[in-house]
Amino acid sequence: MSNLTSETYPWLKYYPKGVPYEINPDAYPSLIEMMEEGFSKFTNNPAYSNMGKEMTFAEVDRLSRDFAAYLQSLGLKKGDRIAIQMPNLLQYPIAMFGAIRAGLTVVNTNPLYTPREMQHQFKDSGAKAIVILANFGSNLEKILANTDIKHIIITEIGDRLGFPKKLIVNAVVKYVKKMVPAYSLPGAVPFNEALAKGAGATYTRPQVSNKDLAFIQYTGGTTGVSKGAMLTHRNLIANVEANNAWLKPLIDVEAGDFHPIIVAALPLYHVYALTVNALFALKSGAMNLLITNPRDLNAFINDLKKYKVTMFTGVNTLYNGLLNHPRFNEIDFSNLKVTSAGGMALQKVVAERWRDATGCLPAEGYGLSETSPVLSSNPLVGENRVGTIGVPWPSTEMRILREDGTWADVGEPGEVCAKGPQVMQGYYNRSDETAAVIFEEESGRWFKTGDIGVRDADGYFRIVDRKKDMILVSGFNVYPNEVEDVLAQCPGVLEVACVGVPDEKTGEGVKVYVVKKDPELTAEKIKSYCRENLTAYKCPKQIEFRNELPKTNVGKILRRALRDEDVVKAK
């Protein structure tokens, strides 16, 4: 960025005092130096807590170094890809930091993937090794022969919980809950054994530059075949530095001995939590409260009661679920300074209820796997405008692109585009897909997000919707986010999803799927509420009640799955 003035970039005048306009993406030669600094600076502080067991930064340092040595002893070289497939457990940061310290490129893999999805990701990335939870070993067995994976490190849920808890948890998971289907993976090495071997091996610090790939972060696949976003060490460092700068008005980690406690309910394999939780902790000395299964709200609330948390990262559905739990008022939020909302649209009613209950208004932000991930956020002090995704982060520029490839005016909808040091290098082995989203012009290298948005005169952005989610009713655009936001405020509605369905008269019609909070809620009550709050063509023609809505593992409602169900029914 250049010519940094509020005339050129109107959003800069809304930056809180102390937040710089630009950050240094070259603050570290690589993530390895950032890790080493954090481990050294916060040695005796707790870094992670999971299932009642805490792990200090010194322990993460030692164990990740041992794991790096073990990986190198296998003959894995700088740039080789290693997949990590597990939920939030103490093993994850050990494996992830260890892989990076060995010079490898991490391929984060959703534990809930089917064998088909696993095979695609492993083959596409060329992964040579994997760290996997035993619960998913049977899926790996089915596709292993069709991949390049030669080294398997397998772990069980309780492996880092200490004796005797480790034995008890692993036995319950395997024999009582029967969560580990039988598998045969000859040569697989238990995680703790790998650490023990690494402790006796030699670790050689690799020569890594910030231009080297740190992660191949796969998109969720909701827009077609899952593609791997190539994220360099510099991409991630830039986003961590910007996050640190953005938090400064409320959490100045350089000011003293204050060490935040961050709720990590989103999985660390997801790019949002990877950067904002795991990597940011290296700068702040924060302890991450790892939630292995956020859908078990009772257990989740028990964990939240153990600590006075400082930061909470999550998505709309997570906050909504907690707010509607009968035990929510048992949690002490007196230390909560930051609530961050991303991944999906934050509904106004949820934001206001969270503020009223905790005293902390969620700051909605925006980002993608391709942007490491954050591009924008509402300021944490000052103008937090609910319903917007805030303003671009330091060293980041965003604009709106018309269909004809020209830049849109203020208030005019179009595709959100962004440039900054956090933007990916491209899609792994997909130059055609890269060319479709990256373009160069005199002002720099821009990324097309695929989201439709508008910018107001102050430089605040609002996402209207994904291009493909837009519903066209008799030539009028209907954006599902708007319909969902209105219906979320309808008395008796717990959750809602809006999709477009074929309609003989109007081309497409609006359909909503609703989960009831009040069993007495009827379709007629919903229609009446919509007629009061939405123009006629935006009102749903079809209403279907569900016990639950399909969601990704991070709690994002899958509209596509609902649309696909309708297509199958129509046939």
Image (tube, rainbow, N blue to C red):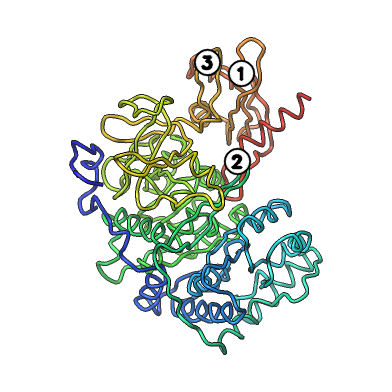
Q: Position of residue 188 (x, y in %)?
A: 72, 74
Three-letter residue code for mark 3: Arg
State left or right for residue 122 relative to residue 137.
left
Indicate which disc, 1 or 2, sits on the residue closer to the N terminus. Answer: 2
Indicate which disc, 2 or 3, sits on the residue closer to the N terminus. Answer: 2
Which one is nearer the viewer's eye here, 361 or 212?
A: 212
Which one is nearer the viewer's eye here, 320 or 58?
A: 58
Picture disc at residue 323: none
Tag 3 secondary structure: helix
Picture disc at residue 508: 1
Q: Are marks 2 and 3 in contact (CB under 8 Å)?
A: no
How many numbered discs, if any? 3
Picture disc at residue 222: 2
Q: Is residue 283 above or below residue 412?
A: below
Label 1, residues with CA under 10 Å away: few <14, some 14-19, many ≥20 = some
Q: Position of residue 424 (x, y in %)?
A: 44, 51
Q: Is residue 283 above or below residue 473?
A: below
What residue lies at 60% left-to-right and 75% top-to-bottom?
161
Q: CA distance from mark 1 to mark 2?
A: 21 Å
Tag 1 secondary structure: strand
Three-letter residue code for mark 1: Glu
State left or right for residue 526 relative to residue 547.
left
What residue lies at 62% left-to-right and 31% top-to-bottom?
514
State left or right for residue 49 relative to residue 298.
left
Q: Is residue 499 above or below residue 207?
A: above
> Can I make out residue 535 in this image?
yes
Q: Is residue 75 above or below residue 143?
A: below
Which one is nearer the viewer's eye here, 462 or 529?
A: 462
Picture disc at residue 531: 3
